[in-house]
């Protein structure tokens, strides 16, 4: 019988699932995902996790509960770093320990450390280590890793072309309602697990799209552009997400194609508390692009969120109308 | 150039010694206060951690007294502290406080850049002199810490309540009028002697509580509402493994002089937290285990709201509590923390520890008497 490995559908699932899935399947395991976030998953997580944690970590607890009894292994790597000289967040580094010391009756946890801070090459040795849980044949693991990287590369390529990650992950293209309004380009900044978890952000991206808006997320910005843009920073940004977000924000400010920027912030996120403020300062100082911060937490109401989104897009549209009325060729 | 720096407990004494010896012009910000916190809260991002807020309050109050350059340490993550310098720079400048930030850190291990900054600070001191000043500073920081440790031991045993604090608080104030490492050391020595001469109850066996958690809130007496002194007043002996001198060596001085850090906490934390994740989470877990092994009666964890590493530690501490049979109290601080509720929780915790101890002692007596 195939060994079942469980992957909680949250946190870095949105970034690395195509890699993890292919890797484990190539090794003969069956990958089991937790369900999409529901009220129950969120409530369970909130109940179990310490009060002070950020929403995404609470959700992670909920997803672990949702899936733990259905699998032989749970994949909760210690994610110290996924990029050179950078970290993710202290909580990612401590995640397997947090789970092990709070959740009872767990299956075996694969908590191998992923730490590419010193070198990207470490990825392969890490894969070897994880692969050992399923097969001992190194060439087989090597092959699985190669396939996984290819799958990941394809995924990244599509995202960079502008496809919303969940459209790929869920294997369906979201149907966008026809809209007579002019297409607006709105950039959205936030952790992937906030941007693409439809339950926690109350379907924000779809709502924007249905409102005649072309959504560009930080994940669609090319890494090379980000590398270039962050050179203007006084001090190197050491959070992977922070660098990506700041680099993208500079890019959005400078392309001249972006009509508005939304920062989607999770309640209690230490990284967001700095990055959002930093970006807001830069945008307000150096550009005229409308900017809004939307907060999500376990109590955010959908109505309030919708009102703020609509007010923001309406405001942008009004601005255009005014400008067009004034300009000579309008 | 007129330097200032953020407060954190007794750090100002050490910073003063360093800057005096370097003959640098500087302003010590007014002590942490409600006002400093209010100013900082006004300008800092709402969800930022408390130390950044108070730091900003310090800078702005020092700015008003003529400071134009902030001296702080940096780091490269994973926690927010490593970006305090940049956040402060942006926030101060956006609000018209024209201040430069001088970060003493080793940017990617770059010693040259570090020495350049030291030279900027000292205005061209030669290297042997720099090393001497650094050594003296280190010495001062160790003495400041051992004086503090003495107060930890003396407070619960003092016969006249408040006598230790009276001497100690005077020292903390009067040190502002003293100049240079030599005089500072002398003043520390005098204070130590004064405390040693206070009347104490040698036979008293206090409860022992280990304080762990995020560094700023555990060390800074304003922020933690004088927890050391409050516990001492309740007859409890405290200890805190994280100290000003440890922090200063870790962040600034180790670039210049070699030192070996005591890492027994790392070993102790291993079964619970398998890696360094930033901040002091590993210390929190490891030291809790060590305190339990040393026979302490309880642990108090303190951290500021939204503090990332300590949230991880808090999630793990229940296992330490269970495995080592030692009660843990977690106190979370923010700008809204009210003193009344805070004290009530501490008192309730100490009551619990007392009862446990009594029960245990009765148990031991029963065993000894053969019942
Ligand atoms: S980056 Fe923010 S949201 Fe993500 S785990 Fe860390 S604190 Fe939570
Ligand atoms: S350790 Fe806590 S208080 Fe210190 S910078 Fe990190 S999050 Fe802030």
Image (tube, coloured by chain):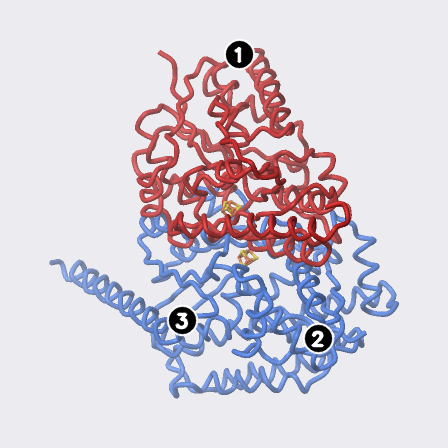
Chain colours: A red, B blue
User: Assess mark 2: CB under 8 A from ligand 2?
Assistant: no
Count neighbours of disc 1 (C-alpha within 10 A) and say few if under 14, some if 14 to 19, many if 20 or more: few
Residue that mark 2 sits on = B17
Ligand 2, what quadrant?
A: bottom right
For the point 40% across and 41% down, the residue is: A59
Between B346 and A43, the one nearer to me in the picture: A43
Image quadrant in which the C terminus of chain B is located:
bottom left
For the point 46% across and 37% down, the residue is: A197
Image quadrant in which the N terminus of chain B is located:
bottom right
Q: Label 2, secondary structure: give it.
A: helix
Count neighbours of disc 2 (C-alpha within 10 A) and say few if under 14, some if 14 to 19, many if 20 or more: many
The answer as to whether the residues below labels 3 and 2 share one chain is yes
Q: Label 3, secondary structure: give it.
A: strand
Tell us which disc is closer to us: 1 or 2: 1
Residue that mark 1 sits on = A137
Residue A76, x across and y down, in percent:
45, 33
Please tell me whether residue A183 is drawn above or below residue B201 in the rendered image: above
Tell us which disc is closer to us: 1 or 3: 1
Q: Is residue B324 left or right of residue A256?
A: left
For the question of whether residue A269 can be seen, the reply is no
Q: Is residue A135 left or right of residue B94?
A: left
Count neighbours of disc 3 (C-alpha within 10 A) and say few if under 14, some if 14 to 19, many if 20 or more: many
Residue that mark 3 sits on = B237
The answer as to whether the residues below labels 1 and 2 share one chain is no
Q: Chain of mark 2?
A: B
Residue A94, x across and y down, in percent:
48, 43
Alpha carbons under labels 1 and 3: distance apart:
57 Å
Please tell me whether residue B283 is drawn above or below residue B127 in the rendered image: above
Q: Chain of mark 3?
A: B
For the point 49% across and 25% down, the residue is: A169
Tell us which disc is closer to us: 3 or 2: 2
Between A94 and A10, the one nearer to me in the picture: A10
């Amino acid at each position: 019988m195939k060994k079942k490995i469980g992957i909680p559908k949250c946190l870095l699932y949105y970034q690395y699932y195509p890699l993890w899935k292919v890797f484990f399947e190539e090794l003969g395991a069956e990958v089991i995902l937790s369900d999409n976030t529901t009220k129950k998953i969120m409530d369970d997580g909130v109940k179990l996790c310490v009060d002070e944690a950020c929403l995404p970590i609470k959700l992670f607890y909920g997803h672990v509960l949702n899936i733990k009894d259905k699998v032989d292994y749970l994949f909760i790597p210690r994610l110290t770093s996924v990029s050179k000289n950078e970290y993710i967040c202290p909580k990612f580094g401590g995640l397997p320990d947090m789970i092990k010391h709070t959740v009872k009756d767990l299956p075996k946890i694969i908590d191998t450390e992923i730490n590419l801070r010193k070198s990207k090459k470490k990825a392969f040795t890490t894969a070897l280590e994880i692969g050992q849980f399923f097969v001992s044949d190194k060439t087989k693991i090597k092959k699985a890793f190669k396939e996984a990287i290819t799958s990941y590369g394809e995924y990244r390529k599509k995202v960079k072309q502008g496809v919303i990650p969940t459209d790929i992950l869920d294997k369906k293209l979201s149907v966008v309602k026809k809209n007579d309004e002019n297409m607006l380009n709105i950039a959205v900044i936030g952790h992937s697990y906030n941007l693409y978890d439809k339950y926690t952000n109350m379907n924000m991206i779809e709502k924007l799209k249905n409102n005649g808006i072309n959504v560009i997320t930080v994940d669609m910005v090319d890494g090379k552009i980000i590398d270039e843009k962050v050179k203007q920073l006084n001090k190197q940004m050491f959070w992977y997400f922070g660098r990506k977000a700041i680099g993208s924000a500079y890019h959005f400010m400078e392309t001249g194609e972006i009509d508005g920027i939304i920062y989607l912030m999770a309640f209690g996120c230490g990284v967001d508390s700095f990055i959002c403020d930093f970006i807001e300062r830069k945008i307000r100082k150096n550009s005229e692009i409308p900017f809004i911060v939307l907060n999500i937490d376990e109590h955010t109401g959908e109505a309030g969120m919708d009102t703020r989104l609509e007010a923001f897009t309406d405001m942008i549209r009004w601005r255009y109308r005014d400008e067009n009325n004034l300009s000579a060729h309008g | 150039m007129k330097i200032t720096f953020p407060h954190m407990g007794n750090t100002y004494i050490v910073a003063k010694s360093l800057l005096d010896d370097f003959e640098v012009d500087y302003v010590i910000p007014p002590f942490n206060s409600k006002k400093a916190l209010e100013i900082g809260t006004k300008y800092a991002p709402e969800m930022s951690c408390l130390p950044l807020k108070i730091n900003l309050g310090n800078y702005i109050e020092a700015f008003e007294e003529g400071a134009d350059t902030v001296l702080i340490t940096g780091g490269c993550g994973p926690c927010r502290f490593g970006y305090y310098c940049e956040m402060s720079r942006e926030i101060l400048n956006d609000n018209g406080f024209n201040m430069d930030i001088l970060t003493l850190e080793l940017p990617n291990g770059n010693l040259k850049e570090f020495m350049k900054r030291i030279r900027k600070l000292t205005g061209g001191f030669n290297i042997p002199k720099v090393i001497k000043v650094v050594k003296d500073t280190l010495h001062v920081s160790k003495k400041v810490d051992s004086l503090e440790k003495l107060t930890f031991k003396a407070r619960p045993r003092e016969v006249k309540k408040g006598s230790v604090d009276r001497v100690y608080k005077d020292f903390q104030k009067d040190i502002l009028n003293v100049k240079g490492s030599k005089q500072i050391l002398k003043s520390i020595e005098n204070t130590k002697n004064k405390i040693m001469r206070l009347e104490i109850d040698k036979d008293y066996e206090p409860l022992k509580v280990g304080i762990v958690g995020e560094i700023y809130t555990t060390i800074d007496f304003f922020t933690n509402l004088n927890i050391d002194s409050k516990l001492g007043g309740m007859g409890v002996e405290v200890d805190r493994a994280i100290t000003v001198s440890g922090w200063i060596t870790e962040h600034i001085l180790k670039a210049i002089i070699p030192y070996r850090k005591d890492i027994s906490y790392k070993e102790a934390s291993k079964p619970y937290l398998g890696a360094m994740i930033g901040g002091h989470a590993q210390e929190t877990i490891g030291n809790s285990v060590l305190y339990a092994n040393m026979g302490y009666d309880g642990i108090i964890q303190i951290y500021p709201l939204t503090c990332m590493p300590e949230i991880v530690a808090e999630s793990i501490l229940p296992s330490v509590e269970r495995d080592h049979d030692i009660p843990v109290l977690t106190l979370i601080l923010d700008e809204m923390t009210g003193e009344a509720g805070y004290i009530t929780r501490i008192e309730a915790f100490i009551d619990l520890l007392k009862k446990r101890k009594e029960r245990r002692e009765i148990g031991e007596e029963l065993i000894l008497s053969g019942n």
